[in-house]
Amino acid sequence: DILRSPVNMVTFSLDTINVPIPQMGHEAHEEIVSNIEKFALRIKEYGSTIILRLQCVVFSKEQVAEILEFADCIGISIVNLIRMDTPSGPGYNRLPIKSFRDIFKRSRKWCKRRKVSVVSSGYHSLPMRIASHFDKICLQYHNFLYFDVDGNALPCCVLRKHSLGDIM
């Protein structure tokens, strides 16, 4: 059981609950939202010190506001806002850096009055942007597990065939 393991942080990818987003986002299947809520409740009941984190690819300020409200409501500690590093396919329009920074700054301001904090592994400084060849190479680090809708633990959302076990 993951609650008895030395894991100190669990990250879930969820880009929306009700706000429409482009197809390449992590959709809000009711089962995913329910699994996140159940896991958060299990952590509270067990008295675990595991930190829950939501990872969210940013598409709009409305979508981020919805995710932050959800996170605050169920006791998620951290929301990691991501500006997708590489195009995900045809028709993908990457959010301009100015828009992303505006949403990130507004989110940090909103979180100051809540228990949830907001971070960003996609808000790179100029040296990081140079290192990524101005966002042509993904520099997102993966030091956490990704859980799919069935509860399978995966290294990230791209490597879906490499299951490391499950949480159910």
Image: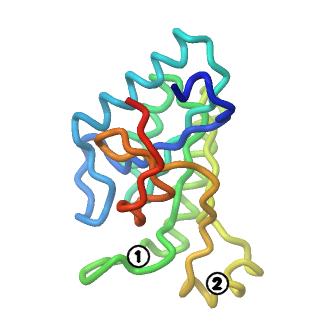
Q: Residue furthest bottom?
A: 133
Q: Which residue is mark 2?
A: 132
Q: Amino acid at mark 1?
A: Arg
Give the position of the C terminus as an image quadrant.
Answer: top left
In the depicted view, which residue is nearer to us: 163 or 159? 163
Q: Secondary structure at mark 2?
A: loop
Q: Which residue is mark 1?
A: 94
Sequence-earlier tag: 2 or 1: 1
Q: Amino acid at mark 2?
A: Ser
In the depicted view, which residue is nearer to us: 161 or 46? 161
Q: Quadrant of residue 125?
A: bottom right
Query: Which residue shows up at 45% across the image and 46% down it?
Result: 153
Query: Which residue shows up at 24% across the image and 80% down it?
Result: 91
In the depicted view, which residue is nearer to us: 105 or 28? 28
Q: Residue 35, percent across and down?
A: 34, 30
**How many numbered dots are placed on residues in this image?**
2
Local crowd at mark 1 within 10 Å, few (<14), some, or many (≥20)? some
Q: Mark 2 vs mark 1: give the one in front.
A: 2
Q: Is residue 129 left or right of residue 148?
A: right
